[in-house]
Amino acid sequence: DLPVVLPEEVVFSPEGGSPLAALPDFVNTVCPTCGGKASRETDTMDTFVESSWYFDRYCSPDYDAKPGLDRKKLDYWMPVDQYIGGIEHAILHLLYARFYTKVLRDFGVIGVDEPFTNLLTQGMVCKETMKCPEHGYLFPEQAAEGKCHICGKDVIIGKTEKMSKSLKNVIDPDYLIQRYGADTARIFCLFASPPEKDLEWSAQGVDGSFRFLSRLWRIIDDYLEDIKPVPAATKDLSTEGDLKALRRKTHQTIRKVTMDIEDRFHFNTAISAVMELVNTIYAVKRPAKGDQTALTVIREALESAVLLLAPIVPHITEELWQMMGHQASVAEMPWPDFDPAIASEEEMTIVIQINGKLRSRMTVPIEEDAEEIKANAQADEKIAAMLKDASIVKVIYVPKKLVNIVVKQ
Ligand SMILES: [Zn+2]
Ligand SMILES: [Zn+2]
């Protein structure tokens, strides 16, 4: 009978399954040995045949020449920077995809040796199971108050296991979205555990996430009228006390969230850093309405919190961003920058001399660079006044101690 040529008159239906199964002419045949009735296999292609190289095809989806891979485009895009999948992918799909890559490389179709640069195997979403002694596993809504919805018997709380339809330990996302909104569902999932660990579902955790978002909303709403007319603080603003501490927290938070997301995908610690920032904003004594300086610092902190959370909770942050008077979407904003000097925890006192005589002092962040320190020394109010008519010969910096400005006498 070989080769068995596949029919081309097939209908691909959204229900899935092999379209060949719907063609009796193809399916029904006779056994080549005994001549009896027989049916043909209809699963003629394994799913990995496609999934092992789709990322190559994605690089040049419109390229028509066989095998549909444009070497120029592939050289530009490949390899894939980040592969994210469940642990089951780490064996099957990863293995096949690497095999395909090596074959395509040997044929000269692509130039890379490995398809993926980084692998992150994320954990599973888990929840305890609930079982009626008579009616088996129950969905959470069928076990309200610990009783079976059919017979009223006490349900048995079982092990925490990977959510699955067969164990019925699943949560309907529609319910969460209706009750709390999609943002709460998102931030809870990201907050509950680092991505490589299993996530244990908890109703209290969902509630806590909702409360945090409400807390963010309230503080922005509360400050809205006061901060509307002022811009966010800029780099060179000088502050003291509470406000200085808040600015430091803001810039430390930007630094931490940036590193947590960029380097490690640790959204959970990124989120808790923003929670801390929001707590710090709450703790600041409310500035007077006209206190421009204080309000710019508050605005900087609030805007940073919104920008940092935008990829995690896009809906509420978009709304808050607009409330604060911005025209453009928060999604179009650049990622916020932090200033290492402002984020710096430690400071040192530097003595400023002119021709070896003590003239002033200044405090600078401990990791401030030498050129910046020399410039700051000359910009110091007292020093600048004394240097007004002087001509500077050179500026000497003795690390962590002093700046000596040598002038012509
Ligand atoms: Zn037979
Ligand atoms: Zn029951």
Image (cartoon, rainbow, N blue to C red):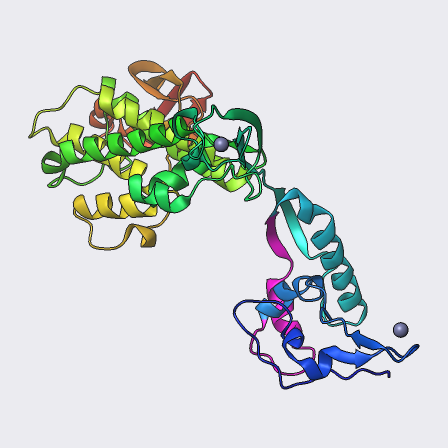
Q: Which one is in front, 191 or 394?
A: 191
Give the residues in magenta. Answer: 60-84
**Number of marks in the rendered image:** 0
Residue 168 position, x and y percent, is: 52, 39
Q: Which one is in front, 47 or 245?
A: 47
Visible in this render: residue 350?
Answer: yes
Q: Looking at the figure, which quarter contains the C terminus?
A: top left
Residue drawn at the location 72% of the way across and 81% of the way down: 26
234 displayed left or right of 12: left
- Residue 78 located within the stretch drawn in magenta: yes
- Residue 170 located within the stretch drawn in magenta: no
Q: Which one is in front, 201 or 9?
A: 9
Which image quadrant is residue 190 in? Answer: top left
Residue drawn at the location 80% of the way across and 72% of the way down: 107
Q: Which one is in front, 320 or 3?
A: 3
Visible in this render: residue 374?
Answer: no
Residue found at the very far top of the displayed protein: 358
Residue drawn at the location 70% of the way across and 54% of the way down: 93
69 displayed left or right of 131: right
Residue 330 position, x and y percent, is: 29, 50
Which image quadrant is residue 72 in? Answer: bottom right
- In the image, residue 136 sits, relative to residue 85, either above or below, namely above
11 displayed left or right of 305: right
Residue drawn at the location 84% of the way across and 83% of the way down: 3
Which image quadrant is residue 126 in? Answer: top right
